[in-house]
Image (cartoon, rainbow, N blue to C red):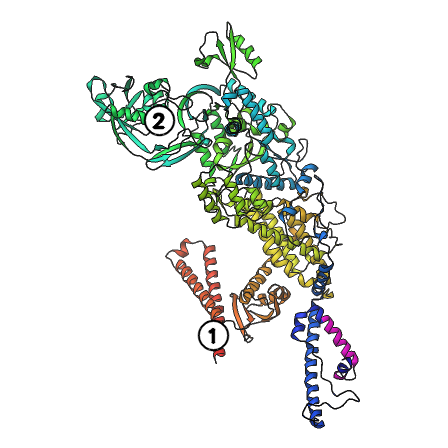
């Protein structure tokens, strides 16, 4: 075989060996190309010596013919070999320009065979120690692997702990205390993501940051949970075991199950100072609550009164307005009510008559709560209503108990045009009627027991549940001939969010905070332009703040529960006092810090033999949480924390509790702490599902953040529904909703992706329509981030040591550009974070990583690392230094948003020799702008390059085959830029070559044409059977769009008075725009003519 090859190459065997050597290299580097140019064994020129002539089966072949045949075969084979050698040489030349890439491929190929899988797996890390990472970066990003171990190390190392004695400026956030009963929901995740972003940024910016964690005892919610547990396990109520044992049960439950959410916050990466963790009912917070009550009472700001409250008959307590969900009932509607076997009808207006004294006939009234007529003490009419003027000062008679009912005139309440113009008044069971009762000094008759039954004042109906009594009263009215009508009526119904009971307005003696004066101070703190102490972000909520505080009512702070802070008030009880009269006399109440103090005070005021009985009520949970910014820092003691960290810096929470919590914190902070508790309030949006619906278990659209972080199957989502309390119909609807929204379950996204998505969503200032696919998209982006850094690290090498300083003037163009845009994005991020525009900050950082670093810079510098070309020796070094700067700054820039992946990647970066590296990225300095990096010229040139590249890519469509292209430049400046940046354009547009032409040059043939702008057009060599007609149609459509823009702009510029009224600056901008459009249209026309000519030529 070799001898045969030697014959082919004549007497130059070295050519043969060179050829074989190239073939071996060629085969290793490009087996696919070798398959195309397969080496065949050449024909022998003559038989070996001593052999007989070949017999073709038809006798001996003619020697002359045979000789000619062999010569032709040799010539043919020689041509084949020359073609093969030429192809091999061409391939060798291409290999020389990209040898490092091929070398890398060979290395990868070898290493794939040799690599140890353990090199890619993180070794185990003992709890709390710094994470031990794999020798080599994993080939794919895995959230669960990357996010493991870092948090425990951060916490144990003390990175989260603030120092009250630090000289650094303080920055403090108090975490809105989640309920002790709660598990992490998506609202908590949003709060944690936003607050941790702020805290990590401020920590890196040189502040002494304190983020205080805590839990709320959640009076009603916790009591309900434990009561249900008690009934489920022991078939007992709290009343069966008594207060003391029940409270002990709650503490046992809290210690065993409470606080789950704080552990879950760790999974999100929340860098809270756990050394200051607190609970609203721990000893220090309880003392603060008692002290606040006593001080406010002494100042006359807490008092006791008999007023109307929202009463829950199942829980047997007053409830806050925020715990009432209102539903609109449009027509007659049956609703399930706790404690009733059959549904109860609502949305019915019942009309009935009261007989009048003195034989004056009857007066007809109407109500949606006919049972409350048992407590009626008046009938109101409008003073100007002529129909009832003869009844002013008269009385009606109650049909069931004979009580005289006054006919009163009230122009405030009564609308003579509505209904009969006569309104029944039940002062003890309706807010409007309560006000009428106060105005007219009416009798207040409570007709309900605490559990919602009719009491002794209900006469024959006593003992009936209120909605059973509704039916009974209606029947009794019919029997007496007083029933008139019952018709559908639209109404608004209050439902307790905890028990689902229908809220009953009831008059009860309660403790109240006087809010008018405190409310005025809180109002001025936010709206006083000359001395504003509090800024509300977004500003739109300042109007709500003003509206609420201008019409603020006194705050009911007592609750009829057993779990909570006991009211620090004792009642003086004398022998012979009836238990029913407990608390009846306001003068007998003694407010003190403890019973001993109460006895000492009482002995100075009351004579004789008496006992002290503490109020059984507890305080509203909002009272203790309203003190939180003070109590978490040690108030009422003058602690180091209080002196260093009060007032706090910002309060971040949902806008739904602006009044219920935020306003009350401000009022109490000013009154008890001497200053506003924080200087800024940032209100995040409320989260809805992707369709804009409120999240509800019955819809199946509730999103558990941990399920997004860890991932869950559709079956797992269904199982969670089964563990709830949905009825079969609700369960079916919920499952259908899950199948529609999460047909394949939820992919594992990790905490970083979830956090980034939530922060990005905050641009929607009112509501967030959360689409899980967006979170999945950011998880995929984390993978791109991972691979970009992995690629960059391969270019830096294992032994790379970054320089301590870089001179931007000496850098290649692409390096100058990336540092310039990096400095700009740092500025954008910092300014946006300072303005609490977290979405813009996150988007700016994302865009730099994605569209500038990954898509442009990393691609643009690849030629510097290709083939170890000495021509790019200095560029290669500069590119490495710039790449390291980008990774270091970019990861620090991103860290507050994505703490886990940035820590992992940053820990793998090399560090300069003369720089002592911090232990963690979270205690590094946050990047700041570098003025000398700014290079407007480089940015302008790259924008032009980017436009050219995008046009060429658009012409190439999906094809990645390298093709030649041309750029037509119509101005000298553009030509200069394009000529000097040919390498970048060829690299980014994946071209085999680039030719720069001007208007005097002949347009390239066999090309598809694109117009970049009025000064630039691009030509890309046609590939295969591409349709020129489709490309021509696009150009024509673009020409039509430009024509419409021209017409619209021309109309605006020709409007009467344009030159006189429109500023000169705008007139010039419009004229320039019109001129630019005209140039671009001409360029498009030129491209259109060129393509029409090509189409015509092809047809011929």
How many numbered circles does the render carry? 2
Q: Main secondary structure of the magenta part?
A: helix
The CA distance from mark 2 to mark 1 is 87 Å
Taking the magenta stretch, the answer to whether it contains residue 767 is no
Compared with residue 855, is residue 445 higher up or lower down, i.e. above or below? above
Q: Residues within 10 Å of mark 2 (few under 14, many from 20)?
A: some
For the question of whether residue 152 can be seen, the reply is yes
- 239 to the left or right of 265: left
Name the foreground residue: 256 vs 1042: 256
Q: Position of residue 799 (x, y in %)?
A: 76, 54
Q: Earlier in the sequence, mark 2 or mark 1?
A: 2
Label 1: which secondary element: helix
- 647 to the left or right of 490: right
Compared with residue 1089, is residue 699 higher up or lower down, i.e. above or below? above
Please tell me in which quadrant of the rendered image residue 791 appears. bottom right
Q: Position of residue 164 (x, y in %)?
A: 66, 31
Name the foreground residue: 42 vs 1099: 42
Please tell me in which quadrant of the rendered image residue 594 appears. top right
For the question of whether residue 673 can be seen, the reply is no
Q: What range is drawn magenta here?
A: 7-25
Q: Residues within 10 Å of mark 1 (few under 14, many from 20)?
A: some
Question: Which numbered disc covers residue 468?
Answer: 2
Q: Residue at the top extreme?
A: 608
Q: Which residue is mark 1?
A: 1092
Identify the residue shown where x is 42% and y is 22%. Answer: 450
């Amino acid at each position: 075989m070799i001898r045969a090859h030697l014959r082919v190459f004549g007497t130059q065997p070295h050519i043969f060996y060179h050829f074989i050597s190239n073939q071996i290299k060629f085969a290793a580097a490009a087996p696919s190309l070798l398959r195309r140019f397969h080496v065949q064994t050449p024909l022998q020129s003559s038989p070996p010596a001593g052999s007989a002539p070949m017999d073709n089966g038809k006798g001996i072949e003619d020697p002359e013919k045979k000789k000619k045949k062999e010569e032709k075969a040799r010539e043919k084979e020689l041509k084949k070999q020359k073609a093969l050698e030429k192809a091999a040489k061409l391939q060798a030349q291409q290999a020389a320009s990209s040898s490092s890439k091929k070398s890398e491929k060979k290395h990868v190929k070898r290493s794939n065979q040799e690599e140890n899988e353990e090199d890619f797996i993180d070794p185990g890390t003992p709890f709390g120690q710094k994470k031990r990472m794999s020798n080599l970066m994993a080939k794919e990003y895995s959230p669960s692997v990357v996010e493991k171990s870092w948090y425990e190390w951060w916490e144990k190392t003390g990175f989260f702990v603030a120092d009250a004695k630090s000289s650094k400026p303080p920055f403090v956030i108090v975490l809105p205390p989640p309920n002790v009963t709660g598990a992490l929901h998506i609202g908590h995740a949003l709060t944690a993501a936003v607050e941790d972003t702020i805290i990590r940024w401020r920590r890196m910016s040189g502040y002494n940051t304190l983020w205080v964690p805590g839990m709320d005892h959640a009076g009603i919610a916790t009591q309900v949970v434990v009561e249900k547990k008690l009934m489920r396990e022991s078939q007992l109520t709290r009343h069966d075991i008594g207060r003391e044992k029940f409270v002990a049960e709650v503490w046992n439950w809290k210690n065993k199950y409470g606080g789950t959410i704080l552990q879950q916050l760790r999974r999100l990466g929340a860098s809270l100072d756990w050394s200051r963790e607190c609970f609203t009912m721990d000893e220090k917070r309880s003392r603060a609550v008692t002290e606040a009550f006593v001080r406010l009472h002494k100042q006359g700001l807490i008092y006791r009164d008999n007023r109307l409250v929202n009463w829950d008959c199942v829980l047997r307590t007053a409830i806050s307005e925020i715990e009432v969900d209102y539903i609109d009932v449009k027509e007659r509607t049956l609703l399930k009510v706790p404690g009733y076997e059959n549904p109860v009808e609502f949305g019915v207006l019942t009309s009935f008559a009261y007989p009048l004294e003195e034989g004056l006939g009857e007066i007809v009234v109407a109500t949606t709560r006919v049972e409350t007529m048992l407590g009626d003490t008046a009938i109101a009419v409008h003073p100007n209503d002529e129909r009832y003027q003869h009844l002013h000062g008269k009385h009606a008679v109650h049909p069931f108990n004979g009580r005289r009912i006054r006919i009163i005139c009230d122009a405030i309440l009564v609308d003579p045009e509505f209904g009969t113009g006569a309104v029944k008044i039940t002062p003890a069971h309706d807010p409007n009627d309560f006000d009428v009762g106060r105005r007219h000094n009416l009798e207040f008759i409570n007709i309900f027991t605490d559990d919602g039954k009719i009491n002794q004042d209900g006469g024959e109906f006593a003992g009936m549940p209120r909605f059973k009594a509704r039916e009974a009263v209606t029947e009794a009215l019919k029997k007496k001939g007083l029933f008139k009508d019952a018709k559908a009526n639209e109404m608004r119904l209050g439902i307790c969010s905890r028990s689902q009971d229908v809220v009953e307005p009831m008059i009860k003696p309660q403790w109240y905070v006087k809010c008018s004066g405190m409310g005025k101070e809180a109002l001025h703190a936010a709206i006083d332009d000359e001395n504003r102490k509090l800024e509300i972000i977004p500003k739109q909520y300042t109007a709500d703040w003003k509206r609420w505080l201008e019409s603020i009512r006194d705050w009911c702070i007592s609750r009829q529960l057993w779990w909570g802070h006991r009211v620090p008030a004792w009642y003086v009880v004398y022998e012979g006092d009836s238990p029913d009269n407990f608390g009846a006399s306001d003068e007998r109440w003694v407010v003190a810090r403890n019973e001993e103090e109460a006895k000492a005070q009482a002995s100075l005021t009351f004579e004789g033999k008496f006992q002290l009985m503490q109020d059984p009520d507890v305080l509203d949970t909002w009272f203790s949480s309203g003190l939180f910014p003070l109590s978490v820092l040690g108030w009422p003691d003058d602690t180091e924390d209080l002196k260093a960290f009060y007032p706090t810096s910002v309060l971040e929470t949902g806008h739904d509790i602006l009044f219920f919590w935020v306003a009350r914190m401000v009022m109490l902070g000013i009154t008890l702490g001497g200053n506003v508790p924080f200087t800024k309030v940032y209100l995040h949006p409320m989260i809805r599902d992707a369709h804009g619906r409120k999240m509800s278990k019955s819809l199946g659209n509730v999103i558990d953040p941990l399920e997004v972080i860890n991932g869950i199957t559709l079956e797992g989502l269904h199982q969670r529904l089964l563990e709830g309390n949905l009825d079969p119909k609700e369960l079916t609807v919920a499952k259908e909703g899950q199948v529609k929204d999460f047909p394949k379950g939820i992919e594992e996204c990790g905490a970083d992706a979830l956090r980034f998505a939530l922060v990005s969503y905050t641009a929607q200032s009112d509501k967030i329509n959360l689409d899980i696919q967006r979170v999945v998209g950011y998880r995929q982006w984390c993978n791109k981030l991972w691979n970009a850094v992995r690629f960059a690290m391969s270019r830096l090498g294992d032994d790379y040591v970054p320089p301590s300083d870089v001179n931007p003037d000496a850098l290649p163009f692409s390096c100058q550009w990336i540092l310039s845009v990096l400095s700009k994005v740092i500025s954008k991020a910092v300014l946006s974070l300072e303005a609490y525009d977290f979405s813009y900050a996150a988007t700016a950082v994302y865009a730099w990583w994605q569209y500038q670093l990954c898509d442009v810079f990393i691609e643009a510098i690849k030629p510097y690392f290709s083939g170890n070309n000495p021509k790019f020796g200095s560029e290669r070094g500069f590119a490495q230094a710039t790449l390291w700067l980008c990774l270091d700054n970019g990861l620090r820039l991103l860290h507050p948003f994505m703490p886990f992946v940035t820590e992992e990647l940053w820990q793998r970066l090399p560090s300069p020799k003369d720089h002592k590296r911090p232990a963690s990225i979270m205690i590094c300095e946050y990047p700041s702008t570098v003025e000398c990096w700014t290079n407007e010229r480089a940015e302008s040139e790259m924008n032009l390059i980017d436009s050219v590249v995008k046009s060429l890519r658009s012409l190439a469509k999906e094809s990645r085959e390298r093709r030649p292209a041309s750029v037509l430049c119509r101005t000298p400046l553009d030509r200069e830029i394009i000529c000097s940046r040919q390498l970048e354009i060829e690299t980014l547009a994946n071209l085999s070559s680039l030719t720069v032409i001007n208007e005097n040059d002949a347009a390239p043939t066999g090309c598809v044409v694109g117009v970049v702008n009025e000064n630039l057009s691009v030509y890309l060599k046609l590939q295969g059977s591409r349709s020129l007609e489709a490309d021509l149609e696009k150009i024509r459509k673009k020409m039509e769009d430009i024509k419409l823009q021209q017409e619209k702009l021309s109309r605006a510029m020709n409007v009467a008075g344009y030159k006189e009224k429109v500023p000169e600056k705008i007139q010039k901008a419009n004229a320039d725009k019109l001129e630019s459009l005209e140039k671009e249209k001409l360029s498009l026309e030129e491209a259109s003519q060129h393509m029409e000519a090509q189409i015509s030529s092809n047809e011929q």
